[in-house]
Image (cartoon, rainbow, N blue to C red):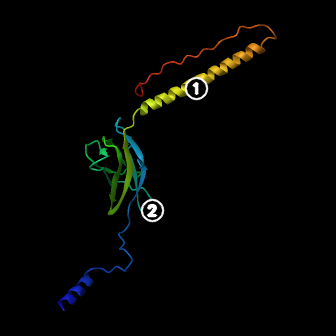
Amino acid sequence: MRGLAWILAWWMVVPLVPAGRAQDSGPKLNLVIVEGEGAINNIRQRTAREAIVQVQDENHKPVAGASVIFLLPSQGAGGTFANGSQTLAVTSDSQGNAIARGFHPNHAQGQFQVHVNASSNGRTGSTDIHMRNEALAGAATATVAGISIKLFVVLVAVGAAAAAGGAYYATHSGGGSSTASSVVTLTPGTGTVGAPGQ
């Protein structure tokens, strides 16, 4: 009898939830990844993309003033924020955006996730941003070389057009008078590389 009384008392205290239906936990926050998903961070140059999320309510309207926490993995590929920590707490701005500023990748190569939690007025939401650390060699050199090749191709095209124009002029000017042919010589110059703004 005591067991039956205990079961009846428990039923009166615990609310019953119909089978197959979960309890409604109320409105939630939606986190939309604005920047950082699929980003590749260069661990040689210590350059990285900032993770940015937009906090939205259940109607997909921006939520200002939400508390947002970015959490990096404690081991393996990842990094730290400007404060040297693997956790960064920020507040969403008037557009609902929260930015993980000051992220520095570590020296471990591979994929990792930035876990993001947000809360505002009893509502919560979370998401993961997938990134990758890679040791990209010569990224700046490849860019400079690409610009040099383009410049060289343009110079060759301009030189060829000038030579063709000169040849046309020499053969079609002044009805049979002899003109001296001109030779166009192109000499590629040397490029210089410096920091932006110098």
Q: Quadrant of residue 154?
A: top right
For the C terminus, give its image quadrant.
top left
Q: Residue at x 38, y 60 (%)?
A: 29
Residue at the disc numbered 1: 153
Q: Is residue 97 visible?
A: no
| Residue nearer the viewer, 63 or 193 | 193
Query: Could one spot residue 164 in this view of the protein?
Result: yes
Q: Secondary structure at mark 2?
A: loop
Relative to 154, is 141 on the left or the right? left
Query: What is the three-letter code of the residue carrying label 2?
Result: Asn
Taking the image as shown, residue 74 lies to the left or right of residue 65, namely left
**Residue density around tag 1, few if under 14, some if 14–19, many if 20 or more, within 10 Å:** few
Q: Nearer the viewer, mark 1 or mark 2?
A: 1
| Residue at the (27%, 84%) spot, across then down | 11
Q: Where does the image place residue 23, in percent across and percent down from the top left? A: 35, 74
> Is 79 located above or below residue 44 in the figure?
below
Quarter of the image for the N terminus: give it. Answer: bottom left
Q: Which mark is residue 59?
A: 2
The extreme left residue here reads 2
Residue 159, horizontal then vertical, whole percent: 62, 20
Measuring 67% from the left and 11% from the top, which residue is drawn there?
182
Q: Earlier in the sequence, mark 1 or mark 2?
A: 2
Relative to 73, does residue 178 appear above or below in the rendering?
A: above
**Residue at disc 1, secondary structure:** helix
* Number of disc labels: 2
Q: CA distance from mark 1 to mark 2?
A: 53 Å
The x and y percentages for residue 158 are 62, 22
Front residue of 112/3: it is: 112
x 41%, y 60%: residue = 57
Residue at the limit of the structure toward the right, as seen here: 175
User: Crowding near pointer 2: few (<14 within 10 Å), some, many (20+)?
Assistant: few
